[in-house]
Image (cartoon, rainbow, N blue to C red):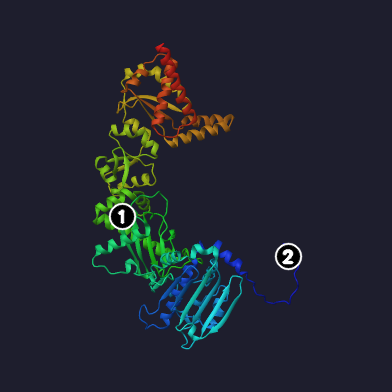
Amino acid sequence: MTLPDTPSSPAGTDRTFQVDLRGLVDLLSHHLYSSPRVYLRELLQNAVDATTARYGLEPAAPDGAFGIRLYADGSHVRVEDDGVGLTEADVHAFLSTIGRSSKRAEAIAEQRADFIGQFGIGLLSCFLVADEIHVRSRSARTPDAPVVEWRGRGDGSYSVRTLPASARPRPGTTITLTPRADAQEWTRPARVHALARHFGSLLLHPVTFDDGTGGPGAAVNPEPAPWARAYPTPGARTRALAAYGEEVFGFTPLDTIELDLPAVGLRGVACVLPEAVPAGRRHGHRVHVKGMLLSEQAEEILPEWAFFVRCVVDAESLRPTASRESLYEDDTLAAVRDALAERLRAWIARIAASDPELLGRFLRVHHLAVKSLAVHDDEIMRMLLPWLPFETTDGHATLDEFARTHRTVLVTSSVEEFRQVAAIASAAGLGVVNGGYTYDRELVHRLPEIRPEVSVADLDPATLTAHLDSVDRETELAAASYLALARDALAVFDCDVALRTFQPASAPALLLDSREARHERTRSQLAREQQGGVWGDILGHLRQEAPRAQLILNQLNPLVRTAVAIDEPELARTSAEALYGQAAMLSRRPLRPAESSLINRSFLDLLAHALRKDS
């Protein structure tokens, strides 16, 4: 690639990047921040970090000595803090240099872990709602420090001047924004107050809001986080956490799980959802960092199987990304995720051991989540597998209940296979579990690990056929002609036909055909059509060896007894096709086009025959 010629310059000359501030703000608004509302979070964050630094400078100051005040009257938005403040050198170094943060100053570098911000570009977010940022600050590091005023404008220009001490009698910083007309949605007093509550309800330093009407300022964070308060009894604590979960998430939790990881300074609560959620759907969790809301949709804080809870946590050691709207994936986050997963496992173990009523309600709602966990967690599997509900030939039952009456448990590989055989297997006394749902087949096969007296095997057509009673030889011979015609009519579906007796007598026919067998026959058919000569003959032979479907006619059914006595070949073929179609529909599997055509044709042929007979 050839670059265009440019004016020559002395070798080694350094140049400075020219920054288009408007373009940078546009980049922030479209690619870094999710919404202009984050401007208020950044203002609060700067105030909180400055206040934290002030306490570091004056450790003897009592709690609450330094606060944060927020004002919004419709024409201006102002945030005032009693923090550490800025000197004129700080203003030039940090406010007027893109990408540099005052929190990188050497004087407070050792306290960096106490601060929320990490990237030094937060103040730029104010240009999302205003064309000018006005800062007045007085440093607490020097007793007679002057007041420094900085004005930054959206066109990239700024001005700095010093003011008399009377301009700000106490140390700290005041940031004032004059909103643009198109930003009024985010700067109205009611919206500013709501955003302050949204982002800062768990902040440790006191924050008040004043709407300019002359009334007393409203506390943005009047109380500590619910897990940080003292309660008279454990029950009162549980109720308070549940009430907080309902306030935040809008549902009454089935139960609450308190979360506490001292190693990373994390505390919070997990609220168990009262209703089931679709498999694989993950709810976002509310994550605060040092009290400031970071994200309402932080999926990464918990493992995928924990979709039965929603959490609110506040952490000290988790790293926010550049936008401070999600978490940085690192070893600390991975360790936190594992530790929180262990807390959820411990809660499940506790209610399994001490609260069977709550365990029952939990499993009725969230059995799928527990099954997904049990597949990969041997301890949970051994603890809860007997209590998990499954669809069986005895109805919906736990494996513990099912194993009491069935020492041999058969499990199907698909839902449609279970539906084909359920009624017949139940009448034959076989214990069959539907293994077609996610995780079920794998878990049922692990039942002998905790119930050694029980054996588990996959159900195959031969197993069920062996439990169906054969008809006597005389009946079989009398039906031989009909069975031959039926086999010929259904040969196109690779289906054999047999006559048996089984319960319930109301079932005229049973179609045994696994999904795997159908796939194998389809694959063989396609391969045969694509090959010729010797290979075609060989593949044709292999196709004949592929598992065939079986249509089992029930001799106990009056309709079948009438059908096998038909002596008209065409009517016999039509009746066999109709019986096949009815059995295929009862299996509830998707019908192939040829089967749908057969059902329609056999119905019309039988109707035409009936009308001719009546006439």
State the residue at coordinates (42%, 18%).
572
Q: Is residue 394 visible?
A: yes
State the residue at coordinates (30%, 23%).
556
State the image quarter where residue 96 is shown.
Answer: bottom right
The C terminus - image quarter: top left
Eyeballing the image, is 266 above or below 350? below
Circle 1 SS class: loop
Nearer to us in this view, 36 or 366: 36
Q: Which mark is first along the chain, 2 or 1?
A: 2
Amino acid beneath label 1: Leu
Q: Is residue 37 visible?
A: no
State the residue at coordinates (31%, 55%).
254
Q: Residues within 10 Å of mark 1 (few under 14, many from 20)?
A: some
Q: Position of residue 79 (x, y in %)?
A: 46, 73
Nearer to us in this view, 408 or 182: 182
Q: Position of residue 308 (x, y in %)?
A: 36, 54
Is 464 on the left-hand or right-hand side of 133? left
**Residue farthest to the front?**
214
Eyeballing the image, is 468 above or below 365? above
Amino acid beneath label 2: Leu
- Residue 254 circle label: 1
Residue on which disc 2 sits = 3
Q: CA distance from mark 1 to mark 2?
A: 66 Å
Nearer to us in this view, 493 or 278: 278
